[in-house]
Image (spheres, rainbow, N blue to C red):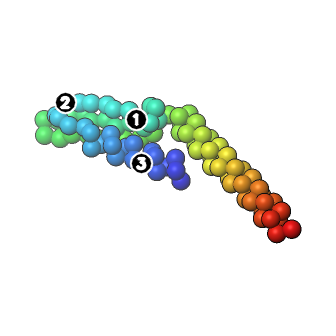
Amino acid sequence: MITATATVVALMLLMFSTSGDEPIRKTGLFGAVFFEVTEATADTTNVTMGVGGAVPLAVIFVAVAGFIALVQVILGGLRTRRRQLLAQRSE
């Protein structure tokens, strides 16, 4: 969910940071997503956006999942230590 949100936010930032009439291709999120504007005819413009590479998205997913797991382990350890201290205090 976090990786998907980051991908959508990156695409939105690329879309709204594009200005001018010249053809342009921008990449974001370490090359994982792209936004491309090309001129089809004198009066029309083609817009393409999508995923340019799955490897950066997989790395981001693994990093976020690892961080969440680490936080859960730390919180579990702190809760256990708190229970031990409360048990010692009540004796």
Residue 57 appearing in the image: yes
Q: Name the residue under label 2.
A: 22
Query: Which x, y percent locates residue 68?
Result: 63, 49
Residue occupying image coordinates x 33% and y 32%: 26
At numbered mark 3, what does the secondary structure look like: helix, strand or loop?
Answer: helix
Can you tell which quarter of the image residue 63 is in? top right
**Left or right: 46 in relation to 80:** left
Q: Is residue 76 above or below residue 70?
A: below
Q: Is mark 1 on a helix, strand or loop?
A: strand
Q: Distance between the residues labelled 1 and 3?
A: 11 Å
> Residue extending furthest right?
91
Label 2 to label 3, Cα distance in Å? 24 Å
Q: State the residue at coordinates (20%, 37%).
A: 19
Q: Look at the image and tell me whether residue 40 can be seen.
A: no
Which comes sooner in the sequence, label 1 or label 2?
2
Query: Closer to us: mark 1 or mark 2?
Result: 1
Going by the picture, which residue comes out furthest to the bottom?
A: 90
What is the C-alpha distance between the residues marked 1 and 2?
19 Å
Residue 8: mark in rendering: 3
Badge 2: residue crowd in 10 Å (few <14, some 14–19, many ≥20): few
The quadrant of the image that shows the C terminus is: bottom right
Determine which residue is flagged by label 1.
28
Instruction: Please provide percent x and percent y for residue 74.
Output: 69, 50
| Residue mark closest to the camera, 2 vs 3 | 3
**Residue 67 point in image, percent of width and height:** 62, 44
Query: Given the image, on which type of amino acid does mark 3 rest?
Result: Val
* Amino acid type for the residue under numbered disc 2: Glu
Report the side of 71 relative to 40 (left or right): right
Amino acid type at circle 1 is Gly
Crowd tier of the residue under label 1, counting other residues whose Cα lies within 10 Å: few below 14, some 14–19, many 20 or above:
some
Give the residue drawn at x 62%, y 41%. 62
